[in-house]
Image (tube, grey):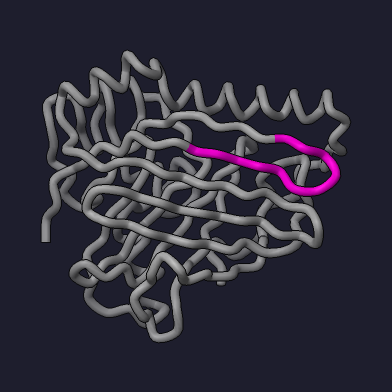
Amino acid sequence: MTHAPQAVRAQTTHVRRGGLAHSFTYGVDMVLIDPETATGPFLFSRNRLNLTAVHDRDHGGKPGQGRGAAWAREVLSARGLGQFDLRLLTQAKFLGYGFNPVNFWLAFDGDALRAVIAEVSNTFGDRHSYVCKLDGFAPIGPQDVIVSTKAFHVSPFQDIAGDYRFQFHITDSRIVIRINHKNGSEGVNATLTGAIAPLTNAAILRAGLRRPFGPLRTVALIYWNALRLRLKGARYRSHPPAPDNEVSP
């Protein structure tokens, strides 16, 4: 089934737990697309330069070497998921520049969400993905908590230890995603929430005026919060090699 691309005017909140308090809330403009067709308005393209665009090479594999939807289908099929509709929630490139701390591949069977691949990238050029599913690919409801061991260096102010606890509530009109990192008494609670609407040229222009060069702004905010943490006395961890396995579990 082909789905028209949609705009998601979202808000992300991060709250650090433990001895050092830190939090932030920012707006972010995202798109929810069918990654295998992704036809859309004039100002949005798939695999070519435009004001906003999504490129297969940026998703599904190492950064810049991705295979797009084919990769996501292989990952889920290898774990036993049969036929499914695939959607991609991501922040589109703006005039050719893009960076996403996390993208979400969403696998649906009708209205039922069967699996999610959380594709996590860091500012060191590494990527690792977490497959989120219930036993037997049972439908994922808003109360379901999916636990995955943390295996990847994201923030230099957090250890590669503990686990992530994922929750997803995706409807026709709204997304709510929660990712809680728990490492003893420390960790980070992260949420992404937003309203879903048709992706139109007017919506793209409004987003560009509201948050110009959105992906560049994302990177700037990451470094700004890193500086704030450093000034608060947070301990810096050196960047370790990325895990050998591309996907867990």
Q: Number of marks in the image?
A: 0
For the residue pair 97 and 10, the one nearer the viewer reads as 10
The quadrant of the rendering that contains the N terminus is bottom left
The residues colored magenta run 12-22
State the residue in front, 135 or 14.
14
Query: Residue placed at 37% from the left, 57% from the top?
Result: 105
Prevailing SS of the magenta stretch: strand
Percent from the top left, x then y, of residue 233?
Answer: 88, 31
Residue 113 image offset from top left, x and y in percent? 31, 68
Q: Position of residue 59 (x, y in %)?
A: 40, 48
Query: Does 75 appear in magenta?
Result: no
Depicted 185 relative to depicted 59: above or below = below
User: What's the residue at 48%, 43% (across, down)?
Assistant: 63
- Left or right, residue 179 beside residue 61: right
| Magenta stretch: includes residue 14 | yes
In this view, the residue in front, 146 or 65, is: 146
Q: Identify the residue at image location x=59%, y=65%.
A: 245
From this view, report whether residue 116 is shown above or below residue 78. Answer: above
**Horizontal side, residue 66 vs residue 237: left or right:** left
Q: Residue furthest front?
A: 143
